[in-house]
Image: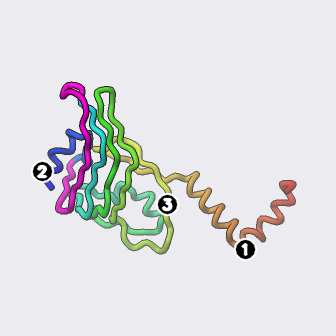
């Protein structure tokens, strides 16, 4: 995989600072159009079953892991990382990102926590989506009979 890491910047992909892939499978399906000085590249890039060394995803997601009730591991094992890429002289885009990592172990159940990723590829910042968490909680309460029963008195107060 070191060869892959050397090729990634050519496709506009930057790994987190100080990290590298170990093992796994890489795949690319790309099409190229136009002259070399104005080349347009479209396609998909992906890696699977690889280990990202030098990047502790768990520590980057410490707030999220606490909300989920899980403990972080020191390793970041990537089951799937894939995306659709478009590179052209006027700019590049990465879309349809699919990322499944096995960095957090010991979850207390199905306690998924929605989050956003900000920052740069070399220094990503993971933030919990508090609005999304509240929406999930409200949906959960609405499905629960206790939540419906508790909502009846509130419905009278709000005029519903």
Does the residue at mark 3 contact the one at mark 2 (Cβ under 8 Å)?
no
Q: Residues within 10 Å of mark 2 (few under 14, many from 20)?
A: few
* Residue 67 lies in the magenta stretch: no
Instruction: Judge left or right: residue 128 versus residue 51.
Output: right
Toward which corner of the image does residue 148 lie, by quadrant? bottom right
Q: Residues within 10 Å of mark 3 (few under 14, many from 20)?
A: some
Indicate which label's residue lies in the foreground, 3 or 2.
Answer: 2
Q: Which residue position is annotated with label 1?
A: 145
| Quarter of the image where the C terminus is located | bottom right
Direction left: furthest residue: 3
Task: Find numbered disc 2 in the image and state the secondary structure of the residue it sits on.
Answer: helix
| Quarter of the image where the N terminus is located | bottom left
Number of the label disc, if any, that sits on residue 113: 3
Does the residue at mark 2 contact the one at mark 1 (Cβ under 8 Å)?
no
Instruction: Judge left or right: residue 99 versus residue 143.
Output: left
Q: How is the image coloured?
A: rainbow
Instruction: Judge left or right: residue 95 versus residue 18.
Output: right
Q: Earlier in the sequence, mark 2 or mark 1?
A: 2
Q: Which residues are magenta?
A: 18-38
Q: Earlier in the sequence, mark 1 or mark 3?
A: 3
- Which sits in the foreground, 29 or 107? 29
Task: Find numbered disc 1 in the image and state the secondary structure of the residue it sits on.
Answer: helix
Q: Residues within 10 Å of mark 1 (few under 14, many from 20)?
A: few
Task: Find numbered disc 3 in the image and state the secondary structure of the residue it sits on.
Answer: loop
Q: Which residue position is annotated with label 2?
A: 3
Query: Distance from label 3 to label 2 (Cα)?
Result: 35 Å
Query: Distance from label 2 to label 1 (Cα)?
Result: 56 Å
Q: For the point 25% across and 33% down, which residue is it?
A: 33
- Determine whether 116 is above or below 35 in the image: below
Number of the label disc, if any, that sits on residue 100: none
């Amino acid at each position: 995989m070191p060869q892959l890491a050397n090729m990634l910047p050519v496709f506009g992909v930057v790994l987190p600072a100080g990290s590298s892939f170990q093992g796994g499978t890489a795949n690319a399906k790309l099409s190229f159009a136009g002259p070399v000085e104005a080349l347009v590249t479209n396609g998909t890039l992906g890696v699977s079953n690889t280990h990202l060394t030098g990047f502790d995803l768990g520590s980057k997601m410490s707030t999220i892991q606490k909300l989920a009730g899980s403990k972080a591991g020191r390793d970041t094992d990537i089951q799937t990382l894939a995306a659709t890429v478009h590179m052209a002289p006027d700019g590049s885009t990465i879309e349809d990102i699919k990322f499944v990592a096995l960095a957090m172990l010991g979850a207390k159940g199905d306690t998924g926590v929605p989050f956003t990723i900000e920052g740069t590829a070399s220094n990503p910042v993971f933030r919990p989506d508090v609005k999304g968490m509240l929406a999930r909680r409200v949906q959960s309460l609405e499905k629960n009979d206790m939540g419906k029963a508790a909502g009846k008195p509130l419905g009278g107060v709000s005029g519903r």
